[in-house]
């Protein structure tokens, strides 16, 4: 017969085991993000560059500048310009400090926001998500997320 003291002790043991498992999972996720975030950022730069190179097809010029400081901070500056008699400009600046779990995004005409690194729930890879969009994004999707709203702001549909 199990008495109430044994039930409380068993519940405490289950909670301690779950807390330990949660800590181990967080440590593993932190290590994975630390290891894979440099490659994610490199792929993001490649995707941004490829998309910016295609923008003239829709009447928008753009440039991507990498002003990163190795071992300190990744910095990408994106400048977009609508080519017309009434040109419009916009930019978005991206910052990721080595060892952090966020990419800080500073658009010229909107409020700054953050993209958060996370381990993708459907696999052992990392992804990012925005506060206002609970969708995990790979580097290609992240580039599209960043550029689409900026292009839409300077190029009416």
Image (spheres, grey):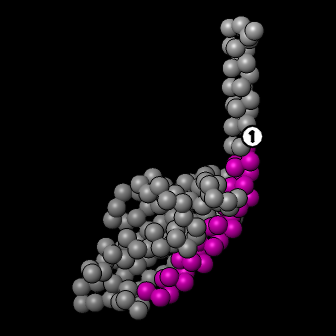
Side of 140 relative to 119 (left or right): left
Q: Which residue is mark 1?
A: 24
Residue name at image x 41 percent, y 90 percent? 56
Please tell me whether residue 39 belongs to the stretch shown in magenta: yes
Helix, strand or loop for the magenta stretch, by majority: helix
Q: In the displayed image of the protein, which residue is found farthest to the front?
A: 1
Residue 88 at x, y percent in the picture: 30, 79
**Residue 104 appears in the picture as rendered:** no
Q: Viewer-proximal residue, 147 or 90?
A: 147
Q: Viewer-proximal residue, 41 or 108?
A: 41
Q: Quadrant of the N terminus?
A: top right
Residue name at image x 55 percent, y 81 percent? 49
Q: Give the magenta part as a residue range.
A: 27-55
Please tell me whether residue 105 belongs to the stretch shown in magenta: no
Instruction: Answer above or below: position of 40 versus 25.
Output: below
Q: In the displayed image of the protein, which residue is found farthest to the bottom?
A: 57
Q: Quadrant of the C terminus?
A: bottom left
Residue name at image x 59 percent, y 74 percent? 45
Dot 1: element: helix
């Amino acid at each position: 017969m199990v008495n109430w003291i044994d039930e409380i002790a068993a519940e405490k043991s289950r909670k301690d085991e779950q807390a330990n498992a949660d800590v181990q999972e967080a440590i593993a996720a932190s290590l994975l993000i630390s290891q894979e975030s440099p490659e994610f950022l490199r792929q993001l730069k490649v995707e941004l560059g490829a998309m910016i190179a295609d923008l003239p097809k829709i009447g928008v010029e753009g440039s991507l500048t990498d002003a990163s400081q190795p071992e300190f901070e990744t910095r990408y500056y994106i400048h977009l310009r609508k080519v017309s008699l009434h040109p419009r400009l916009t930019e978005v600046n991206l910052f990721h400090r080595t060892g952090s779990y966020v990419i800080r995004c500073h658009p010229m005409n909107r409020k700054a926001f953050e993209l958060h690194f996370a381990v993708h729930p459907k696999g052992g890879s990392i992804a990012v998500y925005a506060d206002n969009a609970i969708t995990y994004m790979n580097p290609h999707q992240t580039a599209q997320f960043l550029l689409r709203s900026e292009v839409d702001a300077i190029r009416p549909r």
